[in-house]
Image (cartoon, rainbow, N blue to C red):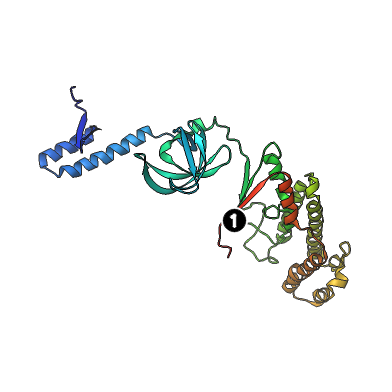
């Protein structure tokens, strides 16, 4: 076979590398031969440049989806071939990459790394990348990766719920999560923060000013009240199953109480009429249960101090009295019973040390 004059043949440990000789590479090689540079340095440069050029030429947009390229690929509990098998995936089956752990290895003569994946059946674990073929973004768009798992996290933990779509759907589980005590949108944990002012939100004004110095304080407070009302309306439209009605009723009353607190404070700040702070909420009577604080507000002349007494002292006193006297359901137990009824398995992965 006549060698191609545009290829530089390099023999390293009985392996021949064919390096395309573009004009810059030919010039470098000529200089090396003429001036007797260290050939190894030039070859290294050629190999690196060639590899970089070739990779750019072949690079395609990739996705988080992979096709299995093995007859039976085991999913391991951790990144080791001796780790417990959690199941397996067959040839051509698609898996989704969730993360990698940068642990390179050689298995059956193949180089690769351990990556963390999820199968279409919801199994999660580690597989070796050499037995996978990365799918392009275009290819991944054709994949329907059915989900039978719902998860969310807070600053402490990752919460995972595995379910049977024949019993409860993903959308139903998401919607009913307002009754989940661990969910960020848990209805009973919602509070109106009338003092909230978010600089990045164009609806708010003059967030850099102190509360009472801000001429738009009441306008900003009304935005917060409106947002809270919108959240209440959203979960009020949900028809809870019988197992969750106890939590649903408790949440409804809690939201009514939070609105009572916010409206009482805002009306007082608008009018300076203390009668708004004397208004009863069902069996709770501020004139009987927050007498000292009401007296302090009436006799105080400093506006900043009045603001503090109303938004903190009066608010906290009423909030404390309400929750001390209100019999609330054991929401953790109620939610747990609901999950059992719907055959949903829950798992918590702590992100911080709980000890």
Is residue 323 rendered to the left or right of residue 83? right
Give residue 333's position: percent from left, percent from top.
74, 55
Of residues 16 and 355, the one drawn nearer to the viewer in this rendering: 355
Q: Residue at x 51, y 38 (%)?
A: 88
As drawn, 232 above or below 134: below
As drawn, 107 above or below 4: below
Q: Quadrant of the C terminus?
A: bottom right
Q: Quadrant of the N terminus?
A: top left
Residue 33 appears in the figure: yes
Is residue 342 rendered to the left or right of residue 298? left
Q: Residue at x 48, y 40 (%)?
A: 74
Q: Which residue is mark 1?
A: 157
Residue 179 appears in the figure: no
Secondary structure at badge 1 equals strand
As drawn, 34 above or below 187: above
Residue 21 sits in which quadrant? top left
Classed neighbour count for the residue bearing mark 1: other residues with Cα under 10 Å, few (<14), some (14–19), many (≥20): some
Is residue 303 rendered to the left or right of residue 4? right
Q: Residue at x 83, y 74 (%)?
A: 298
Q: Residue furthest top?
A: 1
Give residue 260's position: percent from left, percent from top.
82, 60
Give residue 105's position: percent from left, percent from top.
37, 45
């Amino acid at each position: 076979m006549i060698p191609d004059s545009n290829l530089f043949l390099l023999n390293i440990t009985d392996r021949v590398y064919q390096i395309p000789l573009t004009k810059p590479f030919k010039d470098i090689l000529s200089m090396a031969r003429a001036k007797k540079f260290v050939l190894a340095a030039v070859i290294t440069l050629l190999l690196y440049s060639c590899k970089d050029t070739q990779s750019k030429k072949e690079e395609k947009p990739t996705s988080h989806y992979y096709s299995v390229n093995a007859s039976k690929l085991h999913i391991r509990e951790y990144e080791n071939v001796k780790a417990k098998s959690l199941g397996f995936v067959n040839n051509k089956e698609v898996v989704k990459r969730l993360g990698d752990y940068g642990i390179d290895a050689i298995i059956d003569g193949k180089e690769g790394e351990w990556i963390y994946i999820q199968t279409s059946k919801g199994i999660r674990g580690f597989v070796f990348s050499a037995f996978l073929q990365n799918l392009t973004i275009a290819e991944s768009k054709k994949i329907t990766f059915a989900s039978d798992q719902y998860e969310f996290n807070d600053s402490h933990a990752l919460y995972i719920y595995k379910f049977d779509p024949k019993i409860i759907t993903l959308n139903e589980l998401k919607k009913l999560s307002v009754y989940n005590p661990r969910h960020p949108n848990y209805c009973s944990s919602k509070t109106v923060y009338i003092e909230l002012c978010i600089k990045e939100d164009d609806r708010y004004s003059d967030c850099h000013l102190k509360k009472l110095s801000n001429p738009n304080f009441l306008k900003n407070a009304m935005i917060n009240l409106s947002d809270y009302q919108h959240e209440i309306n959203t979960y009020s439209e949900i028809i809870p199953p019988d197992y969750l009605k106890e939590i649903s009723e408790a949440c409804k009353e809690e939201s009514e109480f939070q609105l009572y607190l916010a409206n009482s404070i805002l009306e007082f700040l608008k009018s300076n009429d203390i009668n708004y702070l004397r208004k009863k909420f069902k069996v709770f009577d501020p004139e009987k249960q927050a007498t000292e604080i009401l007296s302090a507000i009436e006799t105080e002349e400093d506006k900043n101090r009045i603001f503090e007494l109303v938004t903190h002292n009066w608010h906290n006193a009423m909030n404390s009295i309400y929750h001390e006297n209100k019999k609330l359901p054991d929401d953790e137990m109620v939610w747990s019973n609901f999950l059992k009824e719907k055959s949903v398995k829950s798992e918590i992965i702590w992100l911080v040390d709980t000890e």
